[in-house]
Image (spheres, rainbow, N blue to C red):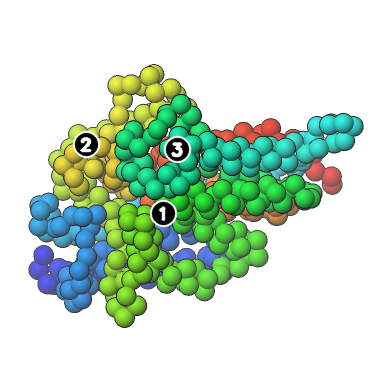
Amino acid sequence: MERIDIFIVFILYLSLFIYIARYIYSSVKEGWSMVSVFLLFWTIQYIVVPLSFILNDNILFLNYKLLDLYIHNHGIDRFYSFLSFETIFIFITIFFFGVKSVRDREMKEYILKERTITIFSKEVSLLFLIGLFLAFLSLASMFIYASQFGGMQRAIEVADAVRSGHGDEVWISKKYIFVYRFIPFSILAIIIFFLLDKKGFWSWIILWVGVGVALFSRLFLFKSKQAIIELLLLYLFYLSLKNRKSYLFHFSIFFIIAVFFIPALENYLDTGKFVISDASNIAQAILNMLTFFNFDQTSLEFALNKNYDLVYFEGIISGLRGYIIPMSWLSSMNANTIFTNTYFFYNLKEAIVPPGIIAFGLYNLGVFGVLIVALFSGYLVKKIDNFFINLIDYAPKFTILYAYVMTKVFTWVRTGIPKFTFYDTILIVLTLILIIGYKREKKCL
């Protein structure tokens, strides 16, 4: 690109950044919303990242990599362009149309009340029993899972191999390896604690067992940086919504810490050692941190510049495989969106690099796919916003549910893969828990 073209692209990205930043700032004064969360992550993924590329290419000249990619090897001169900006602008514009299409409505004349069962002539909350069961199920599952490696120490040592997809090489036994699916239920135990009307000794046991399993499994057994960040975001969003404050200062501090912590965390997940970025070079540290978000913009450029067959939202159906529909029922279907995207990164078809939400639309139905995904996302998040805002007005304890749903938004805006969010096992089980644990009663006027 010519210098003048690069300057114009920079001004366009910068103008959109300023507009959205002002919108987010004005809309979160009394707490975060789903719409603000979507826009925040898209601002980082599709505006801040291209801006950093432009600045680095023309002013900073720092060392950076794109998921181990080097630009000259992949037939794209730059990972920003007029075309990608236009696509981003159209996507965000249609997203706002989706948001504006939802009308505010008050909750109906019903409230939710905990169901109870009688045990030894004493009424016990069904929700409490479910929480207690899930807390100890996750704890037991963690130890059973570790036993398949020969013990907890061995399970921690080979966590990197399992995370890389080489579990078959390190398992001693696979008889009970499936219990790893129950370990994340610890987050449900935490949520249930906050939902309980009455809190006694065993309620606090639910909380601390849940927190212990959640932290230990994320840091040592699964080594998932996304899961760790989701846990931190859950706390921040809950604090914000509960106190009806934006806590922008807290989020700013969180971002600054993340500049140094995310690369250190990634190094720990890869090597088992924390290596903090050199604080003397803030610009390089920020650029290193942004590599955590850059695959979305990179995927967008690939989707705009490469040749591929559209997959017509096939991933929505195939994404059910192994979550709701048994694997054998859809054995011939693959999540082609993520396979196609990964092929452009690594020249192999494996489910490694998710496309991000805009490239997801392009891979599925071209520009019409982008419009559909943008409109759907705007409508959906505003609907969810309205529901929870009305819900916590009369029952503040449900704030934890709103905060948790916000953290799950992170996977949708970041990956653009429906099965990671909408078919998420935890969300499905949480929905069932709410249906079982609560009954509807009419409001007393």
Q: CA distance from mark 1 to mark 2?
A: 24 Å
Q: Is residue 345 left or right of residue 368?
A: left
Q: Is residue 113 left or right of residue 162?
A: right
Give the secondary structure at mark 2. Answer: loop
Q: Amino acid at mark 3?
A: Gly
Q: Position of residue 25 (x, y in %)?
A: 49, 69
Nearest the eye: 291 or 138: 138
Q: Mark 3 = which residue?
A: 150
Q: Nearer the N terminus, badge 1 or badge 3? A: 3
Q: Mark 2 = which residue?
A: 349
Q: Position of residue 220 (x, y in %)?
A: 45, 51
Q: Label 1 neighbourhood size at 10 Å, few (<14), some (14-19), many (20+)?
A: some
Between marks 1 and 3 in the image, the one whose residue lies nearer the viewer: 3
Q: Nearer the N terminus, badge 1 or badge 2? A: 1
Q: Is residue 138 left or right of residue 411?
A: right
Nearest the eye: 65 or 42: 65
Q: Residue 434: tell me if it is visible.
A: no
Q: Position of residue 113 (x, y in %)?
A: 77, 41
Q: Quadrant of residue 22?
A: bottom left
Q: Nearer the N terminus, badge 2 or badge 3? A: 3
Give the secondary structure at mark 1. Answer: helix
Q: Are marks 2 and 3 in contact (CB under 8 Å)?
A: no
Q: Amino acid at mark 1?
A: Lys
Q: Mark 1 = which residue?
A: 225
Between marks 2 and 3 in the image, the one whose residue lies nearer the viewer: 3
Q: Amino acid at mark 2?
A: Lys
Residue lying at 56% horizontally and 70% vertically, measured from the top left: 247
Q: CA distance from mark 1 to mark 3?
A: 25 Å
